[in-house]
Image (cartoon, rainbow, N blue to C red):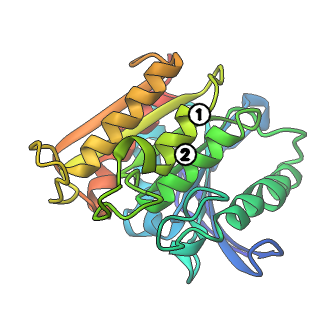
Amino acid sequence: MSSELTGIVVVKNLALDSVSLNRKVLIDIYEPASLSLKEDPRFLLINDGQDLVTMDFTAILENLMDGQSIQPLVCIGIHAGPERKMEYGVAGIPDFKGRGALAIDHSSFVLTELIPFLKAYYSLEQLPLLSYAGFSLGALSALDTVWSHPSIFNMAAVFSGSLWWRSLDQTDPDYSDDQHRIMHQRIRTGGFKPGLKFFFQCGNKDETNDRNKNGIIDSIEDTRDLIQELVDKGYEVHEDIAYLEMEDGSHDVPTWARAFPDFLKWAFGKV
């Protein structure tokens, strides 16, 4: 383990031997230098933790903490492995190409290895108000894990989420948005889960595909449609759901770096 004191935020770099994934998983812990567990800090897991290094996540946190804009927060960046497209996805339901076949193992790592490790590391019986975020395919994975385990998590943050994830190729004549988008189906067939909150970010430059030729790129349409699925379940926009659509947003780390403070202030802002 190594750590770097930056002033307001301490960054700790660890490697966990995962039985579920049969590999070492690198994690970076970002915590306030003056962390006090008596303050009931929030905990946030983040997939694709390697992207946090690229976006200088430490500076993002320090700026918000220095301005006292957010509550005490501990963030855990989970680095993706070499089989990212297999380990991220919807647990138990690979896409039409078989991608995401190990998503259930990644979920097992988070639930049965990472969370127990963090509880022991901080000497806590429970991790209070645990949230989960991710980017692209990692965002889909985070959303699925939160949705499937509402007794453990209370919030999901989805940055440019791969919500197109589907069980049938869109070029297949039998393809249907209503039937074959996997995460939409999982939410539609599930029940209302009280207390969950959701943050979605998407950019008008996330992609150029427009499969139904309606003038709205697929990533935005998939995100809006999933939000509607949540609304149909009983969740309320603004109260339970936040949506940030960035006109100049691309599918890249610099865009997510610009969007992340909006999420942190919405989710963890001081009242």
Q: Quadrant of the N terminus?
A: bottom right
Amino acid type at circle 2 is Leu
Amino acid type at circle 1 is Thr
Q: Position of residue 116 (x, y in %)?
A: 85, 54
Q: Secondary structure at mark 1?
A: loop
Residue closer to the observer: 220 or 262 = 220
User: Relative to residue 93, is residue 172 drawn left or right?
Assistant: left
Q: Residues within 10 Å of mark 1 (few under 14, many from 20)?
A: few
Q: Which residue is mark 1?
A: 189
Q: Which residue is mark 2?
A: 143
Q: Nearer the viewer, mark 2 or mark 1?
A: 1
Residue closer to the observer: 187 or 30 = 187
Q: Earlier in the sequence, mark 2 or mark 1?
A: 2
Give the answer, above or below, for where 156 lies relative to 197.
Answer: below
x 34%, y 41%: residue: 223
Residue closer to the observer: 97 or 82 = 97
Q: Position of residue 78 (x, y in %)?
A: 61, 64
Q: Secondary structure at mark 2?
A: helix
User: Relative to residue 7, is residue 162 drawn left or right?
Assistant: left
x 33%, y 32%: residue: 243
